Image (spheres, grey):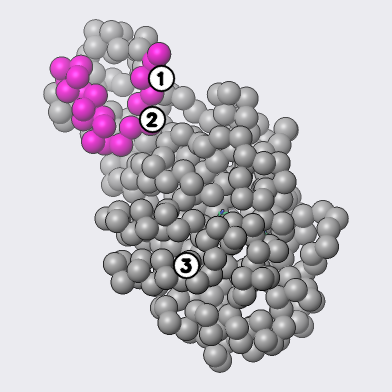
Amino acid sequence: MKVNLKNMTIEELKQFCAGESMESYRALQLYRWIWKKDIDNFLDITTLSKKQREELESRIALPRLKVLEVLQARDKTLKFLFGLPDGNTIESVFIPTKRRKTICVSTQVGCSLRCSFCMTGKTGFTRDLSVWEIADQVRRVESIVEKRISNVVLMGIGEPLLNLKNVMKAIKILNCENGMNIGARKITISTAGIIPGIIALSQESIQVKLAVSLNAATDRKREILMPINRKYNLGRLFEALEDYYSLKGKRITFEYVLIKGFNDSISDAKRLASITENIPCKINIIPFNSIGPGKFKRPDPERIKKFINWLSPIAQAVSLRVSRGSAIGGACGQLRARKP
Ligand code: SAH
């Protein structure tokens, strides 16, 4: 088996170099070649001697995700279909604005949570992504669009907190100043509310942002949308989030997908404000994006405005997510593993 250097954090590269009797400064050098210069051939590393390169080349892998398809929406959002070495596929979305260049990254092939309003869950779960398969989404997109990525949101296909070990390593790779150098505060992990994952994340020293997909303010409604609520209900979830906040001291974002006639009434707004009042937070309203025929619909624009007007005076901070890329199936909830 070849050694895949792209699965390694800088610490692991140091161990690798030690094992190969290479000087320890070589680790940083290798890291820069891989993540800054984006090489895919070990023989290109001209700072190593020719002999060293030839000796190691046959035992080392520097894989890249295969770009199978790139779709562009009118608003300049780009959706990438990537091929993995085992033939599976994932999607990533590039969302440029004047101030930010954001990439939405996948963390699993498929998803096990089967939320009823999300396309990703329909195809079921295949496997976790490895470290490099997560980090290379950012590397590939940055190389293709030739713009520096400023923000990373782990909100693509999959549940990041069910693949936390690989996700954390990938974040360390993205965050490292000798590579893509993306600030930890510019990286957001979004979860459906996996409590053991939230606890594990609270022990990590890196200061990433946490977003929690709430989507309903009562257990009864949340269970209809998200089966995971039967395992981790709102009471337990908020207990875990309060502990998280007391350890991290960082405001949490709640995502709330607004669905016509289901969770968009004035009493839903009141309930939402009340369950979130004891934790410093921001509420991000995401008008439902269509996932094909089904019982859920997006509320009319007037209703969306009304809901925000009900909520804003009684909640701590409220924002509206203008989902982009829906014409290319690149908006929240529309991503899935598919064939090109
Ligand atoms: N599993 C994680 C990461 C996926 S994030 C999580 O649940 O947070 C995907 C985000 O898109 C979530 O906030 C989810 O609530 C939202 N979403 C899913 N389906 C949607 C849809 N059809 N319309 C709008 N938002 C949707």
Which quadrant of the render holds ligand 1? bottom right
Q: Nearer the viewer, residue 174 or 203?
A: 203
In 3D space, how far apart are the residues under numbered discs 1 and 3 (Cα atoms)?
43 Å
Give the structural element (helix, strand or loop) at label 2.
helix
Find out if the beta carbon at label 3 lies less than 8 Å from the nearest ligand 1 atom. no
Left or right: where 302 falls relative to 49: right
Q: Is residue 180 visible?
A: no
What residue is drawn where x is 17% and y is 23%?
18
Q: Is residue 83 visible?
A: yes
* Range of residues picked out in magenta: 1-22
State the quadrant of the N terminus. Answer: top left
Asked where in the image residue 313 lies, by quadrant, the reply is bottom right
Residue on which the image places disc 1 = 61
Spot the residue most to the right.
293
In 3D space, how far apart are the residues under numbered discs 3 and 2 (Cα atoms)?
37 Å
6 in magenta: yes
Residue 236, numbered label? 3
Query: In x, y percent, where is residue 322?
Result: 64, 68
Q: Residues within 10 Å of mark 3 (few under 14, many from 20)?
A: some
Give the structural element (helix, strand or loop) at label 3.
helix
Q: Nearer the viewer, mark 3 or mark 2?
A: 3
